[in-house]
Image (cartoon, helix red, strand yellow):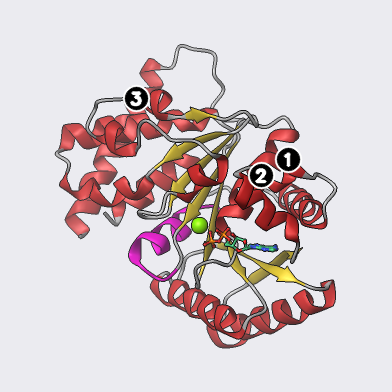
Amino acid sequence: MGDQAEELRKLMSQSSAQDTQRLITPVDTQSKKTRIITVTSGKGGVGKTNMSVNMAIAYARMGKKVVVMDADLGLANVNVMLNIIPRFTLFHVMRRQKTMKEIMEKTEYGISIVAGASGLAKIANLNEEERQNFINELESLTEVDVIIIDTSAGVNNNVIDFVAAAEDAVIITTPEPTAITDAYGLIKIIATEYENLNIGLKLVVNRVKSAAEARKVADRMTNIAGQFLNLKVDYLGYIYDDPVVAQGVLRQKPFLVIDPRARASFCIEHIVDRLEKTEVRDIGGFTAMIRRLFGRA
Ligand SMILES: Nc1ncnc2c1ncn2[C@@H]1O[C@H](COP(=O)(O)OP(=O)(O)O)[C@@H](O)[C@H]1O
Ligand SMILES: [Mg+2]
């Protein structure tokens, strides 16, 4: 694994040297930062996809260019949520059949989606040239302002890698004891796998009946993480249990679009607002994230 990481570092430094030569276009990649938000959870069905999609809408309404990347293996539920059938996935990019731009699906809501980041797991099978091409393609995503990665639940390597590579990792739980336990389990694995990693772990409590209920769950989790794992987890906010969410799923339309004044919509706006008020952690941007992902491929 060390050899592979070394090889990738070489690969990446070559690629950035080439990039500098190629960069005659007046794109200022230094001042413009892409915010990468990974949405994850310990237990499934706690609201990751709903949150990813609706956060994206909230960002788009602020005038930002947003891409939602569906990294939920197999389930591909971002498309279902938006009633879109993607023609191509990251797999086509990997196979050099399509470019990143070609696989991005625009939606009527001002956000784009990229399907099937599960392809990233297959990166180890690529030869060097294919890999280089794929890295270059992924780097074209730095044009966007925000990338939201909807991951699958649980503690498989794929999820952990995404969480570790991203700048902001949002962990969702509900007040259900099983969801809390699984979220804690995930945090614990992140803490032990990446001892020295400074990940911006953020907690969202979904499906609550009151702010006080959310606060209680959050306090418990952040305290335990701090006390036993020496890990700082920030409480980012909560989302009310709201029938508009299920309505959105049923109608395949983001609830923020169905009813921007619903309680859940208000909560999402609030969470995005809070995220925007926190600095984008400078850990090298998207290129560095890709590098970290490949380092562990
Ligand atoms: N805030 C909420 N209020 C009401 N129902 C919710 C809420 N969040 C999620 N749900 C319900 O939970 C289901 C699963 O949500 P989803 O976003 O698909 O979870 P995940 O992506 O984590 O598996 C949704 O179909 C919806 O019915
Ligand atoms: Mg999902």
Q: Contact (CB < 8 A) between labels 2 and 1? A: yes
Which corner quadrant holds the N terminus? bottom left
Residue 10, picture quadrant:
top left
Q: Nearer the viewer, mark 3 or mark 2?
A: 2
> Is residue 280 shown to the viewer in this render?
no
Left or right of 151: which side holds 49? right
Q: Is residue 34 above or below residue 121?
A: above
Which mark, residue 254? Answer: 2
**Magenta segment includes 20:** no
Across and down, in percent, residue 211 comes to 83, 72
Which corner quadrant holds the C terminus? bottom left
Q: CA distance from mark 3 to mark 2?
A: 27 Å
The residue at which mark 3 appears reads as 99
Across and down, in percent, residue 62 comes to 75, 34
Left or right of 11: which side holds 198? right
Q: Is residue 230 above or below residue 100?
A: below
**Magenta segment includes 157:** yes
Amino acid bearing label 1: Val
Across and down, in percent, residue 215 comes to 78, 76
Across and down, in percent, residue 227 comes to 61, 87
Q: CA distance from mark 2 to mark 1?
A: 5 Å
Q: Contact (CB < 8 A) between labels 3 and 2? A: no
Which mark, residue 257? Answer: 1
Binning the other alpha carbons within 10 Å of mark 1 as few (below 14), some (14 to 19) or many (20 upward) gives: some
Q: Is residue 4 above or below residue 59?
A: below
Amino acid bearing label 3: Thr
- Mark 2 or mark 3, which is nearer the start of the sequence? 3
Q: Residue at x 74, y 34 (%)?
A: 61
Q: Which residues are magenta?
A: 154-167
| Circle 3 SS class | loop
Which mark, residue 51? Answer: none
